[in-house]
Image (tube, grey):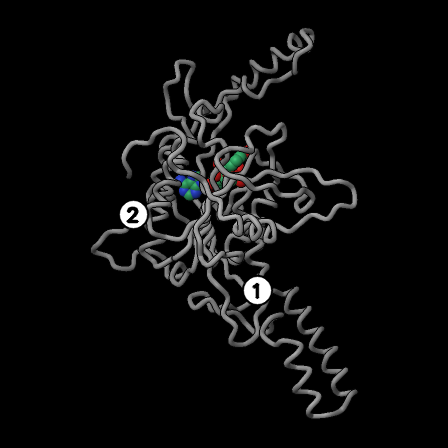
Amino acid sequence: MKGLIRGRITGTRTPFSSEFVQPRDFNMATARRGGRWCYCITVVLLSCALSLSRALSMNMPGQVSTKIVVTGAAGRTGSLIFSKLNADPRFDAVGLVRSETSAKKLISKTRCDLNEVVVCDVTNMEFGEEDDHPWPTILDGAAAMVICTSAVPQISKSSVIKAMLKAPLNVLRGEKAVNFRDFKFKFKPGQYPEMVDYVGQTKQIDFAKKVGIKHVVLVSSMGVLDPDNFLNSIGKDKNGEGHGDILVWKRRAEKYLCLSGLRYSIIHPGGLVDTEESKMKLVLDVDDNLMRREKKSITRGDVAELAIASLTAGDKGRSVSFDCVGEEVEEGEAVPSAEDTLREFLLSGRTADYTLGPSLPNLP
Ligand SMILES: NC(=O)c1ccc[n+]([C@@H]2O[C@H](COP(=O)([O-])OP(=O)(O)OC[C@H]3O[C@@H](n4cnc5c(N)ncnc54)[C@H](OP(=O)(O)O)[C@@H]3O)[C@@H](O)[C@H]2O)c1
């Protein structure tokens, strides 16, 4: 939170926490000293302090919060994960963003401190052997990294105009006025899927190893088993030439992570939407089985919750790769939390089969 003094490098925070003093310990200590009134007043004061600490997301003296690096932190899912972690006293988030413009976007969106943000284009993440500490010290001591970077396609304005001109004819034919697939997209030079979703991700994984990060949560995508998925055509011309294949590059980066020796949690969300979170039941599966569903979307807030659950719902540190979508619930039906849903899934022992899908050239 803005204004708080934080021990950024060690990951400690200023006093007060909801977890440091357990109400039960307090109960026994105070009872021994006697004085029911004293006890009651202290309980009330303690509850107020706990609520305040939660609201201010501060820790009790001595409590160390776990440092998590969130990359692509100015993005739509990344910024949600970053701000949720920042509001949670168990964590201390550092955001990694592509440019100063993205840094400003993140700071104005989440009101985080300037010193919680590192600017780095992941396609250029280089660490010369001669310099033994070339990265900002704020990145030291992190326990986990949540990767939310991805190549961002730019829509071609001429394709929008063409699609708009076709709209009346489509309506007369009884078809959808505007077909999303009529739009053309391109990537900025050097920022296409191979560079961001593969090279950039492998560099982040290498970096994680170099700084001693033990666990990487990677937000990838559902559909990675199908080379003919529409998303792979984005960035290519009508002859299939150009920089595309975003899902193929994502899958390749996933494999790199699986072989890295780091603990991993790979999340494959269905189509991302920005509806209210925690309103849908989360359905988890593997190997694109959920692609057969009619509705295969999930709100970014729920993906953010699953990413955070991946940090907390560890099944003895087991690595896992899973798909996820949201499913409507009946009126009055309870919606299980992302953490409970993930815990239950982890108990099933299921994970993606990396022998499936497009055959990939040798890594790296
Ligand atoms: N859209 C969907 O329906 C869908 C479905 C399934 C999965 N996914 C995947 O889910 C993830 C999150 O999606 P989203 O829509 O929330 O993402 P997003 O808003 O597009 O964010 C992507 C982030 O990556 C950053 N980035 C791109 N290139 C970078 C570079 N070279 N160096 C550092 N940062 C870089 C961008 O930085 P800037 O802020 O500077 O642009 C942006 O903040 C992505 O991997 C996406 O592919 C998306």
Q: In this view, does 79 lie above or below 191?
A: below
Q: Give the x, y percent position of residue 11.
A: 46, 66
Q: Where is residue 165 in the image (x, y as percent from the top left)?
A: 61, 11
Question: Where's residue 85, x and y in %?
Answer: 55, 56
Residue holding disc 2: 126
| Circle 1 Cα neighbour tier, 10 Å, few/some/many (<14 / 14–19 / ≥20) | many
Query: Which residue is depicted at the point 24% across and 57% down?
Result: 131
Point 56% across, 67% down: residue: 4
Q: Tell whether label 1 touches label 2 (CB within 8 Å).
A: no
Q: In this view, does 65 lie above or below 336?
A: below
Query: Which residue occupies the foreground of this view, 302 or 81?
Result: 302
Q: Which residue is drawn at 74% across and 85% down?
A: 39
Which residue is identified by label 1? Answer: 89
Q: In the image, residue 294 lies at what x, y percent?
A: 62, 27
- Quick one: 328 or 181, which is closer to the camera? 328
SS assignment at label 1:
loop
Upstream in the sequence, badge 2 or badge 1? 1
| Residue at the farthest front position | 348
